[in-house]
Image (tube, rainbow, N blue to C red):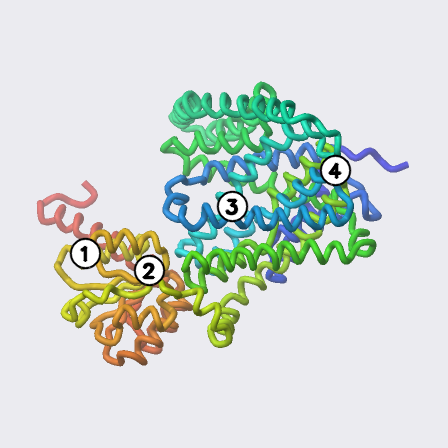
Amino acid sequence: MQPSVTLVSTLAAALGLALIFGFVAARLKLPPIVGYLVAGIVIGPATPGFDADVGLASQLAEIGAILLMFGVGLHFSVADLLNVRRMALPGAIVQILFSSSLGVGVALLWGWGAGAGIVFGLSLSVASTVVLVRALEDQGVLESVNGRIAVGWLVVEDLATVLALVLLPALADSLGFAGNGADARGIWLGLGKAMGRVAVFIALMMVIGRRLFPWMLWQVARTGSRELFTLCVIAAAVGIAHGSAHFFGVSFALGAFFAGMVLRESALSYRAAGESLPLRDAFSVLFFVSVGMLFDPAILIEQPLRVLTVGAIVMLGKSLAAFTIVLLFRYPLNTALTVSASLAQIGEFSFILAGLGVSLGLLPEAGQNLVLAAALFSIALNPLVFRSVEPMQNWIRKRSELASALERRDDPLAELPSTVSQERLTGHTLLAGYGLVGRRIAEALAGNGLSFVVAEQNRELVERLRARGWLAVSGDASDPAVLIQGHVVRARMLVIATPDAFRARQMIETARILNPGIEIVVRTHSEEGASLLAKEKMARVFVGEHELAKGMIDHVLGRLKETVSAGRHPDA
């Protein structure tokens, strides 16, 4: 007789195999999430051998989903979203509608109901924030304009998912989505009740929660106990999630999201994020393992064409839609390809939506299996997709006149106004990038009355700079056309304030060809990149950590010298 599977054995099997397969995935240059999903498949009921308790694992996964959504809320920045709102907001909405339509179409073709199609389409339309952030970090572009647009795009998708989690239960009760034919009044009544409960919950969180919970966090922090502080953070996340579901009928995920948002109001939010991170990571591993346990590998043999179709929607349909949308908004080809690569996968929110659809009786288990299969393949292949961005960009620019025309067609921000005097465009500084570093450099140049031109990918920033009377062009400065529009030929200095070492190298090579005597200054986060550029004597390189250390050393030595000159011993 098989021994009973207890909580301890389920945890031991899940975490142990997740470690093994996660390690193997990492060594294969794949996201560890792939290993966690495979571990779940191995201990799931669909494969022979050890069978973990699916019901128990599902409850642990619920905690994982709560902590995942709590982390999203804790890092959700309205300001970051507003900076890219003109691109991310309409772009994400149009892409969700397009991808969902593809999902609905194939669902209806397979004989599923409209409700199943809607859940299925929504599950395929939202990408994984966890996978995206890790991919952008690996590429070193998380803090770049492309990275901020991609993250902002996914934040909009996350918000749309939160809204779907609210609406689906209400619409499922009213419609049935299976042809029960509830009348319009019942639909709107159920929807109104659901939205009313959500509105009350959000109002309480915004009015009371944003004051109460940060205050409570501060009181606990004053005790000096690290474990009490961590306990307070986790208790707030799980408690608010449970209370929102019990009293307001709101999903655990939405409650956890708002818990993170209200705790973000506290000055201790960064500490809260750091202290809760290990526990969030552990339970998120259990979440992905439990998702893998629900997957039946037999679908790969029984329905290979459906698996390929769903994979094509995720990796081709979504990406092509995003690619076209970004170009139509007149952003550079590099931005379009980066956003496309970011969306060529699905993850945690797709699992949550599919699981909710199955629990409500809207989505068949076969649909959930297809979502899981698409997630496995898209997450595994996403690093390869990101690595193909640069080669694909070069290939498209050489062979596609349409893409080049879309990228720069009739764009008034892609070139400087003809009224600019030649004096301002001779011996000037060309500044590539207007982020945290570029902004300070531009302010210093303007404050000293020096002429400069900013080359920036974010069109909204370019519009603001021109409104201030500054010279700025929109585009990717690694594109020679953008440097030409910045009059690099007559520039005295090129300052590269973007952290992307690969693109910086392209800018340097172009600038040297067009203006051999130009002085080039570049920033980098990488020791390897700095040593390579310095060895080739291509530019004056500044490494962020080195400059920070120099500034701190100068301050420390200066203060100590002041102390000694005042006749006091430094140790006094």
Mark 3: few/some/many CA within 10 Å (<14, 14-19, 20+): some
- Of badges 3 and 2, nearer the viewer stands 3
Give the label, 1 or 3, closer to the camera.
Answer: 3
Give the mark nearer the N terminus: 4 vs 1. Answer: 4
What amino acid type is highlighted by mark number 3?
Answer: Ile
CA gap between label 1 and label 2 equals 17 Å
Label 1 or label 2, whichever lies nearer to me, is: 2
Q: Which mark is residue 9?
A: 4
**Real-space Cα separation, disc 3 to disc 2, in angstroms:** 25 Å
Q: Which residue is mark 3?
A: 93
Q: Quadrant of the N terminus?
A: top right
Q: Which residue is mark 2?
A: 456
The span from disc 1 to disc 3 (Cα, nearest Å) is 39 Å
Q: Quadrant of residue 118?
A: top right
Circle nearer the N terminus (3, 2):
3
At label 4, the amino acid type is: Ser
Q: Are marks 1 and 3 in contact (CB under 8 Å)?
A: no
At which x and y percent is residue 507?
35, 71
The residue carrying mark 1 is: 444
Q: Mark 3 or mark 4, which has the lower sequence index?
A: 4
Residue 182 screen position, x and y as percent? 70, 26
Distance between mark 2 and mark 4 Cα atoms: 54 Å
Which of the image's four quarters has the C terminus? top left
Q: CA distance from mark 4 to mark 1?
A: 62 Å
Identify which amino acid the numbered label 2 is placed on.
Answer: Glu
Mark drawn on residue 204:
none
Spot occupied by residue 549 in the image (x, y as percentages of width and height): 29, 55
Disc 3 is placed on an element classified as: helix
Q: Amino acid at mark 1?
A: Ala
Residue 550 vs 536, above or below: the answer is: above
